[in-house]
Every structure is written in C-alpha cells, then in structure tokens.
Amino acid sequence: MNAAQLRAAARARAQRWLRDRGYLVERLTPDELRYMTSWSDAPIPAGQPVPQRDDPRLVALRRRYDELDWPVTAHSRWSDRSFVDFARFRGDSLYIWHYRESPRVSALKYFMFLRYVEERDHKGWLDALGEDGAFGCWTFEFPGRRPVSRDLLDSVNELTFLDRHLQLSGWDGLRALDIGAGYGRLAHRAAQALPGLRDWCCADAVAESTYLCEHYLQYRGVVPPARVVELPDVPSLAPGAFDLAVNAHVFSECPREAVRWWAEQLARLGVNWLFVVPNEADGFFTHEADGSRRDYREVLEQGGYRLVVDEPAFADPAVRELLRVHDRHCLFERDRP
C-alpha cells in the first residue's frame, strides 16, 4: 500500500470513528470557510466613510456618559464593547445576530424568513427599502428578488406589526422615541417607510451606540426626520413630545433597574404607546450582572403601561421552530388619566 492509500485508509477510519460517535466531518469550500469564520460579509467599499475609535466625537461622548451615575448606565450584556468592529458594525455583533450556520442551511432559513415577511408585506416595503450590505451586513440573494438581510427582514416585520395595530403608514406627524436604538437600524427603516414621520429620536445608554447611530443615520441621509439624543439629555426631553416608544430586544439585555429608569422617563414624557420585542418565548425578563433573570413587566405596569397585544414575531409555529427564533412583538398602552 502506497502513501496515498495509507492516508485514504487512515482518513476513512477516522471518519468512521467520528461518525460512530455522532460527528460528521466535511471539507469546506473556500466560500464556506469564509462564511463560517468571518464576522462580516463583503469588504468595506473604497471611499465609504468609516467610524473611528479615536474620533474626538466618540471620546467626548464616552467622557460624558462615564460621568453619569444612573441605573441605566450599569450594563450587564454591554459591559465590554471592545470587540465591536466599527468598520463592520452591521455584521455579526452585539447589535444584530445573523443566525449563521452552514451557507446552505442559512440560505434556506433566510428564504423561509423572506417568504414569511413577503406574505405580510402589503406595503411593498421589502422592495422599497432594499439592502446594500453596507458596513459588513450579511446579505442573501435569491432568484427574482432583491438582496435581503436580517436588518431588513426584522425591520419590515416589526413595522408591519405596528402598521397593523397602530396604522403607522397613515399616521401624519408621528413622533417616536427609540430606546436602545443601537446603530439606528429601525430608525433608518422607519424614515424610509413612513411618509408622515415627523421625528424618530434615537437614545442609547452606550456611548459607542450613540456615536455609530449618528454616523449611520447621516450616512443614510435620513436626518431629519431621524435624529440622535445623547443619554444625559434624555431627562430634558419635553413631556408630550412622543406618541410611541420602541424597544427592540434591549430590555431583555439590561438590568431591571435600567428598565425602571426608562419606564420612569416614559411616564414623565406621557408616551401613549410602547412597542417591546422581548428575546423570550414567554414572559419579560432582564439580564442582570450576575447572569440572573428578573421579571420587568411589573416595572412597566408600575409606570402605567398595560399589555394590550402579545404576538409571536412569527405567527406560524413551523417557521418559529425551523428558524429557532421565538421573539415576540408586544404592544403596551399607557393608562390615560
């Protein structure tokens, strides 16, 4: 037996040994290897402005945020932001996960995600809003359709829910406060989709998020109606300035006392509607610094907010199971005096 035959026999023996123990080993193509090991998709195009960690604007924001001794600045999930890639912040990051597995499995999941949203997208937002993959965003392309991403699909799904319950697309003069806005994902999409939008105000307790949001919304050309408010200025926002507050996945990733701080601000502002996307299939739970989970629904209720709609983000249970996504879309209404 020559050397090549010996290697083949050893490889076959190793594969059998692994298979008998429940493991399957396959050689990845170069594209598959890149997909499985990279945190972002396409390289940054030449000439695209890139946020910088040493930008004096970010340095000033960090200094201002660090001076605050408020419950909302005591982070649990966001205590370490050093690994956020500023050039590719729309890739896999703390801001947005892309459910990546093998390329084929991911493509099948995203096609199912796309078909689900398409069937409910009566405003044609998927085509109108589009996706260009900027800042490292993972995109998927299917024959006869424009590129899509989780950023786009989540946003259209959320806006469709709000349109169904609050008729957002026909709301002239809508004013919204985006709590934990991150890099401005939903603000960008709302500014594209809603012709009557007057103000979409983005707030975040993380200085890096405020900085990236400013950069991203300016890059997208949606300022106004979108804008960014620094966290220290939130208590100065005027009562009656907002009709709706949105919180996508954020309360599930911060301590209970941070939720209480935001609930007190909402009550002070007199915001009538609160849209929340919890990470859990049931209940409303925070993420404490020690890893424990605490209920925050009662905190919202103490602030005068009553749950009026609680729906799975994916109404079809088969879609939920195949995507392994059990998020919910929840709408709270403020008790009127």
Image (spheres, helix red, strand yellow):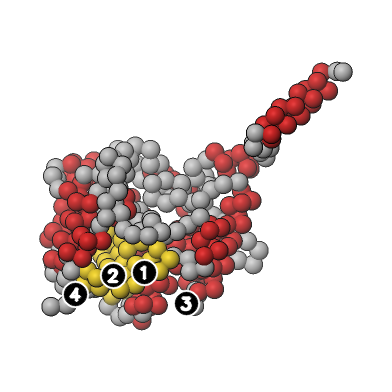
Residue 6 locus on image (x, y percent): 80, 20
Taking 156 as reference, is 173 above or below it? below
Horizontally, residue 91 falls left or right of residue 76, namely: right
Inspect the image, locate mark 2, and give the three-letter code of the amino acid beneath it.
Answer: Leu
Inspect the image, locate mark 1, and give the three-letter code of the amino acid beneath it.
Answer: Asp
Q: Residues within 10 Å of mark 3 (few under 14, many from 20)?
A: some
Residue 313 in sight: yes
User: What distance separates the C-alpha of mark 1 from that of mark 3?
Assistant: 23 Å
Q: Nearer the viewer, mark 3 or mark 4?
A: 4
Looking at the image, which residue is at 50% across and 74% down?
A: 120
Residue 60 locus on image (x, y percent): 20, 43
Secondary structure, mark 3, is loop
Quadrant into which the N terminus falls: top right
Looking at the image, which residue is at 46% across and 46% down?
A: 92
Q: Which residue is mark 1?
A: 310
Looking at the image, which residue is at 39% across and 76% down?
A: 163
Secondary structure, mark 1, is strand
User: What distance separates the C-alpha of mark 4 from that of mark 2?
Assistant: 10 Å
Q: Nearer the viewer, mark 3 or mark 2?
A: 2
Q: Which residue is mark 2?
A: 307
- Upstream in sequence: badge 3 or badge 2: 3
Taking 145 as reference, is 78 above or below it? above
User: What distance separates the C-alpha of mark 3 from that of mark 4?
Assistant: 31 Å
Q: Which residue is mark 3?
A: 123
Secondary structure, mark 2, is strand
Check whether the beta carbons of the residues at disc 4 and disc 1 lie within 8 A of each other: no
Check whether the beta carbons of the residues at disc 1 and disc 2 lie within 8 A of each other: yes
Q: Which residue is mark 4?
A: 335
User: What distance separates the C-alpha of mark 3 from that of mark 2?
Assistant: 26 Å
Horizontally, residue 302 falls left or right of residue 289, namely: left
